[in-house]
């Protein structure tokens, strides 16, 4: 596959040999059987800079999370660590506090120049479902080396709500990249000055990331976020607008203090203070955990597609919804506090379809918003 792509950078047409593969290149990988599936793709499975991954027919409840390690196959580890098998073809409940491994419908035969990475889908993160991709021989989660040939598995661990999944459910997504194309601090500043990546005149740029802060001022009703309830019913991950918000979430309001105490091991949905903009020739990812800003994790689902927050794609004013969990100790967040960073990468080319109007995306032009499952 030809690695050179022509794209527009600051109004100048240029050719790149490194970057994130766009939808057209992902389609080529599918046509060339570099992404292999024997099941017809869903119509919207290929996104502007990623492909959604689908659960296969069987889930394996395992004793604990694991990595196969160099030279080892996941299937061999499953034979040692599985407790029982669950048939997903008719749908099944995955319980909180349990770890499951599911072989996916997609497998890989990557070219030697293409590597991949994975992340939970936005809706998955907003349900507090912890997911990580593993492959044969992997020594780290969510990272697939260039030239990998073999099956792909998803580790799933619901943390707040039990969920109903089935064969074909899409909880995770995968990006493909050629070479290294992450913007450094000076490139980020130049792109921000030209395109306004986050809605601030004084961006916090450090170590290749641009900072996002938290909004605790609230909307017109003072709503600042939601905390997940415990001991709820199940969430059906394949059904939109099927569950009432108050059955699963406790609304949190600003009562005049502009701060919020995060209780340990509770799950919160909050929103960034700044609008976010990902130009069409770039993709972004939220750094999931930054020990420099506090003992909490922000944003399980870290991919921001090209066109997120882009005015011409209907996204002007889109803010980052943040999935937040404190660790070990209570932690006080204050309005405007830095909570995470966005890392930007070049695309090899502009995607054919941008996030937003082109795809009918669920979270374009969003403010504080729960996942698509709730009304």
Image (cartoon, rainbow, N blue to C red):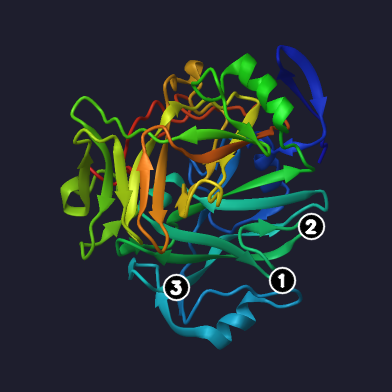
Query: Which quadrant would residue 164 be assigned to in this image?
Result: bottom left
Q: Height in image: 5 above or below 303?
A: above
The residue lying at 54 percent from left, 56 percent from top is 39
Give the alpha-carbon distance from disc 2 to disc 1, as whole Å. 12 Å
**Drawn side of residue 109 relative to residue 330, left or right:** right
Q: Dot 3: few (<14), some (14–19), or many (≥20) neighbours within 10 Å?
A: many
Question: Which residue lies under the disc numbered 1?
Answer: 137
Q: Which mark is residue 147?
A: 2
Is residue 111 in sight in this rendering?
yes
Q: Position of residue 108 (x, y in %)?
A: 68, 58
Query: Which type of secondary structure does the marked residue at label 1 adopt?
Result: loop
Query: Which type of secondary structure does the marked residue at label 2 adopt?
Result: loop
Give the alpha-carbon distance from disc 3 to disc 1, as whole Å. 20 Å
The residue lying at 31 percent from left, 49 percent from top is 261
Question: Which residue lies under the disc numbered 3?
Answer: 99
Q: Height in image: 28 above or below 350?
A: below
**Drawn side of residue 214 relative to residue 193, left or right:** left
Q: How many marks?
A: 3
372 or 149, nearer to the observer: 372
324 or 101, nearer to the observer: 324
Query: Which quadrant would residue 136 be assigned to in this image?
Result: bottom right
Upstream in sequence: badge 3 or badge 1: 3
14 or 66, nearer to the observer: 66
Q: Height in image: 326 above or below 10?
A: below
Upstream in sequence: badge 3 or badge 2: 3
């Amino acid at each position: 596959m030809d690695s050179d792509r022509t794209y527009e950078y600051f109004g100048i047409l240029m050719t790149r040999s490194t970057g994130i593969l766009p939808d057209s290149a992902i389609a080529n990988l599918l046509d060339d059987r570099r992404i292999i599936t024997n099941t017809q793709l869903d119509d919207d499975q290929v996104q502007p800079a990623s492909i959604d991954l689908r659960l296969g027919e069987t889930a394996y409840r395992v004793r604990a999370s694991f990595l196969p390690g160099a030279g080892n196959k996941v299937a061999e580890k499953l034979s040692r660590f599985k407790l029982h098998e669950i048939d997903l073809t008719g749908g099944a409940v995955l319980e909180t506090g349990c770890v499951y491994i599911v072989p996916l419908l997609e497998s890989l035969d990557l070219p030697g120049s293409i590597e991949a990475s994975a992340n939970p889908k936005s809706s998955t993160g907003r349900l507090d479902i912890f997911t990580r991709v593993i492959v044969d021989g992997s020594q780290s989660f969510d990272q697939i080396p260039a030239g990998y040939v073999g099956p792909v598995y998803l580790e799933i661990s619901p943390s707040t709500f039990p969920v109903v999944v089935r064969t074909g459910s899409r909880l995770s997504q995968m990006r493909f990249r050629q070479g290294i194309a992450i913007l450094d601090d000076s490139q980020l500043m130049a792109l921000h000055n030209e395109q306004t990546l986050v809605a601030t005149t004084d961006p916090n740029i450090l170590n290749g990331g641009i900072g996002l802060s938290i909004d605790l001022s609230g909307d017109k009703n003072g709503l600042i976020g939601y905390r997940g309830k415990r001991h709820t019913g199940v969430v059906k991950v394949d059904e939109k607008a099927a569950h009432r918000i108050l059955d699963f979430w406790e609304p949190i309001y600003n009562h005049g203090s502009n701060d919020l105490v995060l209780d340990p091991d509770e799950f919160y949905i909050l929103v960034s203070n700044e609008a976010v903009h990902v130009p069409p020739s770039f993709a972004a990812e939220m750094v999931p955990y930054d020990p420099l800003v506090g003992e909490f994790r922000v944003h399980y689902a870290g991919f921001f597609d090209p066109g997120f927050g882009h005015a011409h794609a209907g996204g002007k004013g889109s803010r980052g919804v943040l999935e937040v969990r404190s660790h070990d100790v209570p932690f006080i967040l204050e309005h405007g506090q830095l909570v995470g960073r966005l890392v930007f990468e070049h695309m090899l080319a502009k995607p054919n379809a941008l996030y937003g109007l082109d795809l009918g995306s669920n979270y374009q032009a969003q403010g504080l918003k729960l996942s698509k499952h709730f009304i």
